[in-house]
Image (cartoon, grey):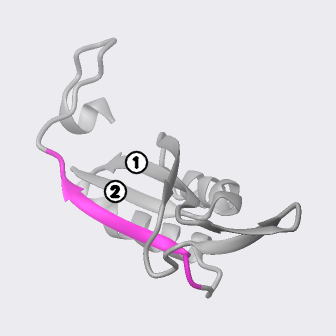
Amino acid sequence: MKLIIAAIKPFKLEEVREALTAIGVRGMMVTEIKGFGTQSGHTEIYRGAEYAVNFVPKIKLEIVVGDAMADQVVDTIQKAARTDKIGDGKIFVLDVEAAVRVRTGETDDNAL
């Protein structure tokens, strides 16, 4: 199993969710986060005063899938989240040692 963590632009969330649902992803966790990368923030003007925004709002997706589906999920997220502008995000893929469905006690692939 693989844990796929993706940081994407907030306005791309629904498009990414629809694309993942279309390929058979049955669940994901979504968190509102702030961070910076290459963008390293930006400046904004509020009531005539300029100030630095050091952390940019992002959405973090966490999805656990079987090994066979991981590449397809990464490709789908990349295509759906892409704007061709700086700050489109990052995707990380990690190994998952175990998974357990709390309600039934099912484990690993059956728990997904």
**In this view of the protein, which residue sits in the foreground, 9 or 4?**
9
Q: What element does badge 2 sit on? A: strand
Say which residue label 2 marks: 4
Q: Earlier in the sequence, mark 2 or mark 1?
A: 2
Is 59 located above or below residue 104 in the figure? below
Q: CA distance from mark 2 to mark 1?
A: 6 Å
Q: Is residue 107 left or right of residue 37?
A: left
Pointer 2 with pointer 1, Cβ within 8 A: yes
| Residue appearing at x 50%, y 69% in the figure | 76
Magenta stretch secondary structure, dominant? strand
For the C terminus, the quadrant is top left
Q: Characterize the local packing of mark 1: few (<14), some (14-19) or many (20 or more) Cα atoms within 10 angstroms.
A: some
Position in image of residue 72 (x %, y %) = 40, 68
The boundaries of the magenta stretch are 86-96
Mark number for residue 30? none
| Residue appearing at x 59%, y 78% in the figure | 82
Is 67 located above or below residue 79 in the figure? above
Q: What element does badge 1 sit on? A: strand
Say which residue label 1 marks: 62
What type is the residue that disc 2 sits on? Ile
| Residue appearing at x 34%, y 56% in the figure | 4
Q: Is residue 23 magenta?
A: no
Outermost residue, top direction? 103
Q: Is residue 32 left or right of residue 74?
A: right
**In this view of the protein, which residue sits in the foreground, 110 or 15?**
15
Q: Is residue 87 magenta?
A: yes
